[in-house]
Amino acid sequence: MFIGWYKDAVCANRWNFSTDTVTANANLYAKWAENTYTVSGKVEDDQGTHTAVSNATVKVMQGNIQFGDTVTTDSNGNFTVTGVPDGTYNLVVAKDSQNVTTCIKVSGGDFIFEGSIILPRGYRNSTLDVIGSDTPNVVVDKLNDVFGDSSVYNSVDEDNVADGGTVEIKLTVQQNDNSTNKATVEASMKSNGYTAGTVLDVDLTKISTTNNGASQESSISAINDTIKIIIPLPVELQGKDNYVVYRAHDYGSGVVVDTITTRAKNGEYIEISSDKTQITAYLKYFSTYAIAYKKNSSSTSDSSGYSLGSMRSYEIASSADLGGSISPSGNITVKEGMSKTYTITADEGYCISDVLVDGESVGAVNSYTFSDVKADHKISAEFERRETSALPYYSENGKAVFVGFATDASGEMKYIAPDGVTVLFEQNPKGFTDIAGHWAKNSIDFVTERELFFGTGGSDFSPQSGMTRAMFATVIGRLYERSYGKIANSDVHTFTDVDYNAYYGNYIDWASENNIITGIGGGQFKPDREITRQEMAAILYRFDKFLNASHTDLAGTQLNYSDAADISPWATGAALYCQQTGIISGRSNGNFVPQGMATRAEVAAILQRFIESTVK
């Protein structure tokens, strides 16, 4: 099947007949695919029981290039797009003034979106805008998760949406040869021996529009978690070595230039495709970026002025995969005849799997020395996750039920299991692709391996998304019944706004009957409202008292959180409990942020601490 015309021989950058222009002789390359596939899924809203959304439009996009036709969801919310070859794409779903942008990967078969695509509550929209015919047709992932960042999407925005307004998070990518910071970033590249490539302005914007049409646009310079941008490389940048992404950014005291490499730093890093036609960047800051590379050189003159013959220098290039580090890192110069030692260190939860020197394995060593250097060299370290601990489980109706209260924090596995069950052990690893380098990765693994809660679809966990009150009640209920036995069904219901036939109905009944959860008044629970940090703290405090677990003495203690005055009186005791047990340490600057939305990552970390404080 004919796919289209491309600007490069490897068919990474498609020609756009709507925007690309011919200014000189140009070669176009035809791309054919032996197979194309379908992309299908279901669109639902996020109200109540998730009603199917009909007549929503669905497009498969790479930047400004569309693959397949625009289709419309049927009465059941289902859609199918045909004629899509292997590749990574944005799936853009829109209806009326609502739209959502997600990321999918088609690889050797039809793609079926696991779970449902959720059109967000109210008008919370995420869009990608690729400007200019010379700009690479980028794809973005995790853009929707920005709504889970309370520093971006705050209580004012929530009220605006609740009143019928709109909040749009827009990522704009533009190749800009006139960028204000282009000269700054290119000078830094040149001084470090790198060849300058594509310069991109990458901007994140929040556009808030009230229900009377008044609009306000604000630039977002930074977020708390990364978004993922997949960038096809222009022809002149393909097949190079030593890729680095340079960034010119104002962190508050003027523009500085820093680099993003394959080694994660503050959660940011890049990945290079095996065929060197694509870079994937995980970014938290938005400003001017430039893709650069450095040619491997056989030798250079020493800066002291000695001739090559009398004082020759060589370059050693080092790199490390995710899961650890190598020191020194990057490219360094070593004088002829000298030695250089490298130290390899694995991150927590990882181990060294191999070290390659000039492409040859030297084993899983933690140090390596180049002696009597007389040539350029490369050294790279590879890591893998440590073997996942075997977790206790028991069989129930032929299915494995992993024990909730189980931890090996003390060095041995301790757990609480229901009476009368036979406890066995096995590993239960998960494979989420959006938590690499995330601060809560170990905690996310902890709770999902125990199946206290799951991902959001496919291989995504969505760590920065919020969690509803109903889902948190479910998590607490699952934790309890996996260690103390099945929760019985109840015919007595407390709240008038809860769908007791939903997955969470029985858990809300149980938690209410045992005074673990309370409503908001008027017989309502608001199951679909995202839980706040002080609500989460209060539920855990009551759950601890229900279990009679911690015996924590709160008498005479004072709150140390910087924003203690903002904590509601009804949550003060819970906040003291969380402070004394260390379950909630606070966000930046020691703030508890009581009204802030609890993210899925925070819930995972806090649950792990709660379990470890209970099982001793």
Image: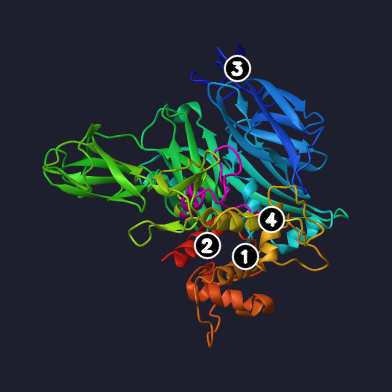
- Between 595 and 336, the one nearer to me in the picture: 595
Dot 1: element:
helix
Camera-near label (3 vs 2) is: 2
| Mark 3 / mark 4, whichever is N-terminal | 3
Query: What amino acid type should be assigned to the residue bearing mark 2?
Result: Ile
Tag shown at residue 536: 1
User: In this view of the protein, can residue 436 be seen by the observer?
Assistant: no
Please tell me which residue is depicted at 63% across the width and 30% down the height of the picture: 133
Query: Marks 4 and 1: in contact by CB < 8 Å?
Result: no
User: Given the current orientation, which residue lies at the most extreme right position?
Assistant: 212
| Mark 2 / mark 1, whichever is N-terminal | 1
Camera-near label (3 vs 4) is: 4
| Residue 607 in picture, x, y percent from top left | 52, 60
Structural distance between the alpha carbons of marks 4 and 2: 17 Å
Provide the residue span drawn in magenta.
Answer: 443-471
Dot 3: element:
loop
Query: What amino acid type should be assigned to the residue bearing mark 4?
Result: Ala
| Mark 1 / mark 4, whichever is N-terminal | 4
- Between 558 and 359, the one nearer to me in the picture: 558
Residue 69: image quadrant is top right
